[in-house]
Amino acid sequence: MTLARKGHWTTVVGLVLLGGVYVRAVVFTPVERLQGPAQKIFYLHVPAAVWTELAMVLVGVASVVFLFLKDPRLDRFAEASAEVGTVFAAIVLTTGPIWGKTVWGTWWAWDARLTSTLFLFFLYIGYLLLRGAVGDAGARARYAAVLGICGMALVPFIHLSVYLFRTLHPQPIILKPSAPSLPPSMLVTWLLSFAVFTVLYVGFVMQRYALGRAREEGDDG
Amino acid sequence: MGETLRHAWTLARKDLVLEFRTRTAILSAVVFTALVLMVFNFGRDPTAVAAIDLAPSILWVTFTFAAMLALNRAFQLELENQALEGLLVAPISRTSIYWGKLAANLVFVAVVEAVGLPLFVLFFNVPVAQVLGPLVGVIALATVGFVTVGTLFSAMLVRTRFAELMLPVLLLPFLIPPLMGAVQVTARLLAARPLSEVAGWLRLLAAYDVVFLTLATLLFPHTVEQ
Amino acid sequence: MADAPHNAGYMAAAYVATALILLAYAVSLYRRAARR
């Protein structure tokens, strides 16, 4: 099976499993007393946010290694990860305000997670635009790598500046040194959702990577 | 190292001499700054909004625009005269090219800020006398931050399509952390609050400068590789 | 104790939006590959 087909089927599996997560989240996970059913947006919003950031870090890492090794496969992977990261960012920026409206009474409040994701979204758009604007393949890969590395370096500063601001976002309750504050059934739902988003990331990247490879071969051939 | 610095300084001086001889870019930047400050001042209702509430943001929007003008001008000049190709075959390191460009851009922006700041004080009637030292300090820290990244990016963009449009788009996320810090610290200073309150932001500004200056120096050669 | 707020509509909107975005991207990738 080619990479494109494997990626395609991975994505299909991921989407089917997502349906399972939907059912589990909506029907079989308890409703949060204070926030109501809208709290369940959390099971999609946070895994997407985590992958938005992970995808950016991976773009950065691939970019660093690319500048040393000059292997075009790394550049292709970075390109794929950036596009998929943009899609996940769109999910975060869509589900966030919907959830926010119910919790804050307003569609947007400059809270930590949404603001950081907005930054990442701009970084991704810039990265993709830069790739689109450079004709020469060699230059494109180098410039994208430079931008990717700068983007990755910016991430801690994004978090720091957002942290230094007061935030309205609910305190993180998944990753705490002590036991997580989420009741077990909610934690399981969250973990399942995160696993499914991981599958989707992998499937999407495989397909996008294969697409990038096919384009390059088409141009050279 | 010493040679790199000397080359950088020579390059910077060349750029600056060219600039001040023609004076067009610096004049337009200064006029633009004055215009922005005036418009913001006329735009607010003095009975409803205190100058001091808006002032820090207005100051920094103005300085940011001025920095963008400087950055655009710098590499356009090079591109028009195709001097960049000449620079690349000259026996100077890539690093000195970057530092030279950076120094020239910083001087340019500094001149605009040096004119802008008194105008700002005049139009907005804000008390800067007591805090002038720290204020100049934070202006320097933030300016170094965005001109460092901006110089690196304009080197990449000069030969791409839509370069003038791309620069602000690419630069936007990189401007926000130093700008946030700059506005916060400026606001505290103008309100005569102690600097200790903004220690976190100052550390962010300093760390940002160190990280991105280092990164830009390391990455610049990759933007001009042949 | 007060009842939980009735905001299931918001939840549905977010869930539908997420599914649409993911499906649209999956379809886009599939069609771009088919064109090659």
Image: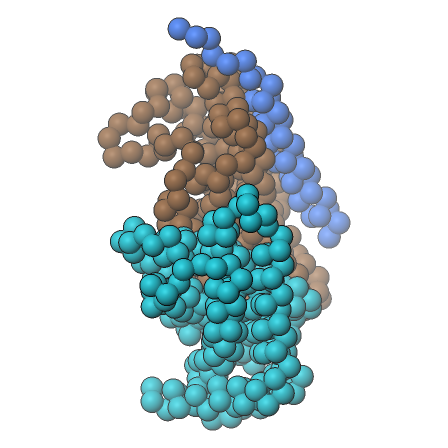
Chain colours: A brown, B cyan, C blue
| The furthest residue to the front | B47
Q: Nearer the viewer, residue A2 or A42?
A: A42
Q: Position of residue B50 (x, y in %)?
A: 50, 48
Specify the quadrant that holds the N terminus of chain B: bottom left
Query: Residue A101 sits in which quadrant?
Result: top right
Residue A41 percent coordinates (x, y): 51, 26
Q: In front here: A71 or A138?
A: A138
The residue at 49%/25% (across/down) is: A103
Residue occupying the far top of the picture:
C1
Query: As drawn, which residue projects farthest toward the right?
Result: C35
Q: Residue at x 60, y 59 (%)?
A: B169
Q: Relative to A175, is B179 on the left or the right?
A: right
* Res. A188 image quadrant: top left
Residue A78 visible from this viewpoint: no
Residue sitting at x 48%, y 59%: B125
Relative height, residue A178 to residue A221 (above, below):
above
Q: How many marks can you see?
A: 0
Can you give x and y, in whole percent of width and height, for residue B107 in the image? 47, 79
Residue A132 % position (x, y): 66, 61
In this view of the protein, can residue C35 be seen by the observer?
A: yes
Image point 42% across, 74% down: which residue?
Answer: B217
Quadrant into which the C terminus of chain B falls: bottom right
